[in-house]
Structures are given as structure tokens and as C-alpha cells.
Amino acid sequence: MKTLGEFILEKQHDFPHATGELSALLSAIKLGAKIIHHDINRAGLIDILGENGHANIQGERQMKLDAFANETFKAALEARVVIAGIASEEEDNLVIFGKDRATEGKYVVLMDPLDGSSNIDVNVSVGTIFSIYHRITNIGTPVTEQDFLQPGNKQVAAGYIVYGSSTMLVYTTGCGVHAFTYDPSIGVFYLSHENVQFPSIGKMYSINEGYYSKFPMGVKKYIKYCQKEDEKTNRPYTSRYIGSLVSDFHRNLLKGGIYIYPSTAQYPNGKLRLLYEGNPIAFLAEQAGGKATDGYQRILDIVPQKLHQRTPYFVGVKSMVDDADRFMAENP
Ligand code: AHM
Ligand code: MG
């Protein structure tokens, strides 16, 4: 039985930066996860369900738990001196942790504190997604937006927490993907899946088919391909869609599948945010032998132009994403 703390210490040589820093960073995430786990598990009993009457910068209505998760992770991360500041799906602007931290902090963290929050009120799994970068501006000068707008291929670590039938923390530092299951009775994350890899053959597709008529032709044709019988390629694939990216991705990672949120008439650039959802999940996907694209290009190579940028998203088993990309290229 190995704990997350022990595992990180053991693997510190994998982290290409100074000893102890990854542990400090991940222990802040771990603490936030425990607090959110605790509250989500009592969600029907305390007054945290429903909307809080506010909208985030993207005009989406905020749930009470969105705001609570945001404040919780912000406070946990602020307590670690190595972090200069954060960007969050629930914050309009960057949050820099004071003057000294802006100049001395080495890392920036980008996150979606509570992904899939429309599922909270009905007791369906939600998640937290995080992405960590080393700043690119010089220490001694204030951190800038440039430090947050790096392409995903510069991430030093990324991961998610899925609050499901059990709570799990899954992360990568570029040396494989490792998953830890939370034991709430003693408050410890234990290593449960070391070096997770996608199955080589997929059998599930996850997409909100209610928007079928609004999808690009390539996606429509790919869905029909998924539904067509073909023994050699394991088709028809089964369809599974929770509507909570972390949970859909987690299942597809373990069972073999593809998740797609393409452009639609309502969301011409897709719905998912490149920095808070797209990049961290893409980093994990590639580390697990999978692939992530916007239908045409590698997610991790996109140079972000703004914090809350959206992207169409195709992620999962490599051969499945290859097929979907082919349909996109053939049906412009
Ligand atoms: P959120 O960050 O506001 O929760 O939005 C992202 C979520 C994803 O987790 C999920 O896959 C998708 O939105 C569901 O959207 P839809 O209801 O349009 O299918
Ligand atoms: Mg989200």
C-alpha cells in the first residue's frame, strides 16, 4: 500500500525541476480534493446544491459548488510559496498571489475547479482538472499573462480528480499516468493504478448526440462509422456519455474509448476550454498512449491567444482519434 505522498517522493527524479516543489504543488491539490470530496459527499444535506445566482465570464451560470471549489483550491494553492498565481475557469482574470509571489513564484497553475457541475444536483460524478507550468518570464520580474498562455506541450504536470463511486486522483509529470484512490476513513490517497495505458483497441464513443444536426459533416459520418457493424474493428461501438468530461475520459481511459466535443452551431469553437480542460487531459491522454486533437491538429501544439479560449476536442484511444481525424479531413 503506497500513498500518493510516498509515490511522489520516490518519483521526484522524474520531475525535471527542484526537489520538493512537485510535492508542495501536488499536496495543495490533494488537500483541495479532500475538502471537495467531503462536501460533495454531503451535498444533499448541506446548503451547497443549486445555482448561486452568478454567471462566470463565459456567461455560464455558476453553481454554488463551482464557486466553493474555486475558493477552496485558490486558498490551498495560495498557501504554497512556489506558486505565483492561478487562472481558473471560474475567475474572469488571473489571480496573482501578491507582489512577492508574482516575482518569486516559479509555477503557475490553471484549473477547472469543478468540471461537469451541471451534474451535481443529480448525484452524478464530477471532477477537478489542473495543469501546471513553469513560468517563462524571469524570476525577479512580475509574472505576466504570457506565463499562462503557453502551449500544452510545456506543461510540467497535469491531472484530475474524479469524485465518483470513489474519489481518485490521476496525474502525470510526463513519465506515465498514475492513479490514486482515496480512502476517506483515514484521509489518504493510495496508489491503485500505476502507469495506466489506454487499451490498444477501443469500443466506446462518448458525444452529446442530441446536437447531431449541428455537428460538422466529418463528425456525423464518424458517428455513423461507430454504429456500423464490422467484426474486425469491434464495431458497432457502444455509446456512453455522462456529460462530465473527467468521468467520460476516465472511463474511456480504463475501458477504451473516444470522447468528442466538436464545434456546434451553439459553440462554433467547441465548448471545452483549451487551458483548463483541453491541455491537461491531452497531456494525460498522450502519456497513456492515446491522442488528443481538435479534429485536425494536436491539442498540445496549439498556441493559446486568450485565457478562456475554447477548442473542439477529440480525445481517447489513438486509433479511434486517428479515424475521427480522417473523417474530419475527408469531409471539410
Ligand atoms: P463545465 O466546465 O461548465 O462543467 O463544462 C464542461 C462540461 C464537460 O465536462 C462535459 O463533457 C460537457 O461540458 C457537457 O456539455 P453538454 O451538456 O453540452 O453535453
Ligand atoms: Mg469544465
Image: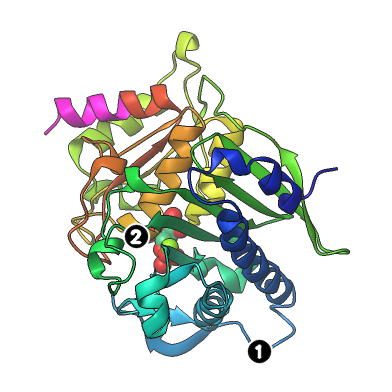
Magenta includes 53? no
SS label for mark 2: loop
**Residues drawn in magenta:** 323-332
Q: As displayed, is residue 68 above or below residue 159?
A: below
Callouts 1 and 2 close, C-beta under 8 Å: no
Q: Nearer the viewer, residue 131 or 81?
A: 81
Disc 1 versus disc 2: nearer the observer? 2
Tag 2: amino acid: Arg
Q: Quadrant of the N terminus?
A: top right
Horizontal side, residue 285 vs residue 267: left or right: right
Q: Position of residue 290 (x, y in %)?
A: 45, 30
Q: As displayed, is residue 310 above or below residue 122?
A: above
- Residue labelled with disc 2: 135
Point 29% across, 42% down: residue: 299
- Residue labelled with disc 1: 47
Quarter of the displayed picture in which ligand 1 can be seen: bottom left
Q: Position of residue 273 (x, y in %)?
A: 32, 59
Q: How many marks?
A: 2
Farthest front residue in view: 140
Q: Main secondary structure of the magenta part?
A: helix
Farthest left residue in view: 332
Farthest right residue in view: 185
Point 23% across, 46% down: residue: 302
Point 64% across, 40% down: residue: 11
Q: Position of residue 122 (x, y in %)?
A: 61, 69
Q: As displayed, is residue 269 above or below residue 288?
A: below
Magenta includes 325? yes
Q: Position of residue 107 (x, y in %)?
A: 42, 62
Label whose residue precedes the other's in the sequence (1 or 2): 1
Tag 1: amino acid: Asp
Point 44% across, 56% down: residue: 131
